[in-house]
Image (cartoon, helix red, strand yellow):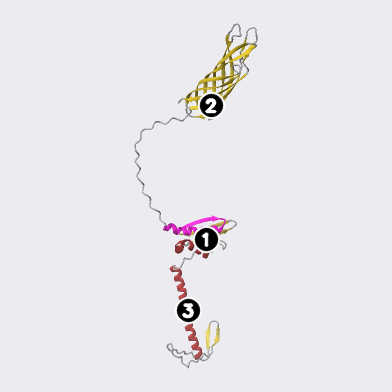
Amino acid sequence: MSPRVLSKPRGAAVVEDCTVEAGLFATPGRKRRARAVSCMDLRRVVIASHHLGRWVALVLLVGGLARAQESGGITAPRTPFELPVECGTEAEFRTELTRLVGPDVERAWPSTLRITGDATAGYRLTLDVAENRREFEHSDCRVLFRSALVVAAASVQTAEVAPPPPAPVPPPAAVPPTREQPAAEKTDGPTLRATAGAGAGVAVGVVPGATAAFEARLGGELGAFGVVIGGRYFLPRYVEVEGRGVDIQGFGLQVAFRVEPIELLALSAGFDADLLVGKGTAEIEVPLEDSAWTLAPSLELALIPINTRHLSVELAVSGRVAVQRPVFEVTGFRTLYQVPPFGLVSVARGTFHFF
């Protein structure tokens, strides 16, 4: 006899005559003996099925809400954070990014943040933010983590700050007409200049003893090099031996080559030719006047404390070696004076530069 189950609408009681006789129910592979089912057992089955349906509906509702949340994008977008633990965490990134951009954290949130590698081979950052991909490499992953924060924050600030409009170009200022300026002096190479100078000083080794010396000279300069031609006059000096004496004066001629290695120094090398004129005094019975030439190469060193374009002041010292030494003597008596082998002339001079 097959089981008979009576059911009523919800809230009605199930009939008591619902006992099922024992029998056999066929199942695949084996047979199982059925037991008698009472009305109380049927009521428990019905109530359990109602509760199971409610739980299934609740689970479906929660799953649907979860799928709606993922598709709707209501909360912060989920970022695939793939980075070692020592580099940082997603929570730390969100905290720092919120501190930098405030309420714009959602706009600055990257779509990808991935740090791969290790401390031995170095780390590599891949960052997708504002539809742009950035990639960085560094040996310290914390540096890459902070770099990702800066780039993400800058993506929002760059979008908000619009470049200022270009300033209008002012019209060109009117240039008042000016007089034609004279052509500037050419400075492509050294210029040739003429010079004239004069000076005075002391000479030793030309006439007897030390005497005053005066000079005048002309020259030409080409850059730092030049040539000088000058004349000198040596005041007469008196020399006497055993009551017999003579006055000797000198007239000199000098030719020298000159170079100025620096602005305050000049060197000259040349040749001096001096005419010495002697005149006997009254102690000599037959006064005579005679002359002789002395020849001496010379070398001069000049200090130039004042050196302007047109005027210079020099303090010069020159030494000389006499290669021809004339002798003044009284006939039948003895030698009165002979030019010494070495001489010295010290002069202070001023030189005017033309052009």
Return the residue found at the far top. 286
Indicate whether 138 appears above or below 258. below
Amino acid of disc 3: Val
- Residue 30 position in % (x across, y down): 56, 83
Which sits in the foreground, 140 or 351?
A: 351
Label of residue 56 in the image:
3
Work out whether mark 3 precedes mark 1 in sequence or the reverse, and give the earlier one: 3
Q: Give the residue drawn at x 47%, y 59%.
A: 153
- Residue 190 position in % (x across, y down): 48, 28
Reading the image, the residue beneath label 1 is 114
The part of the chain drawn in magenta is 131-160
> Along the horizontal axis of the image, is 181 left or right of 32?
left
Do the CB atoms of the residues marked 3 and 1 lie less than 8 Å apart? no
Amino acid of disc 1: Arg
Which sits in the foreground, 62 or 200?
A: 200
Reading the image, the residue beneath label 2 is 314
Indicate whether 48 appears above or below 118. below
Report, in whole angstroms, how far the alpha carbon at label 3 lies from the one at label 2. 119 Å
Q: Main secondary structure of the magenta part?
A: helix
Q: Secondary structure at mark 2?
A: strand
Amino acid of disc 2: Glu
Q: Is residue 131 visible?
A: no
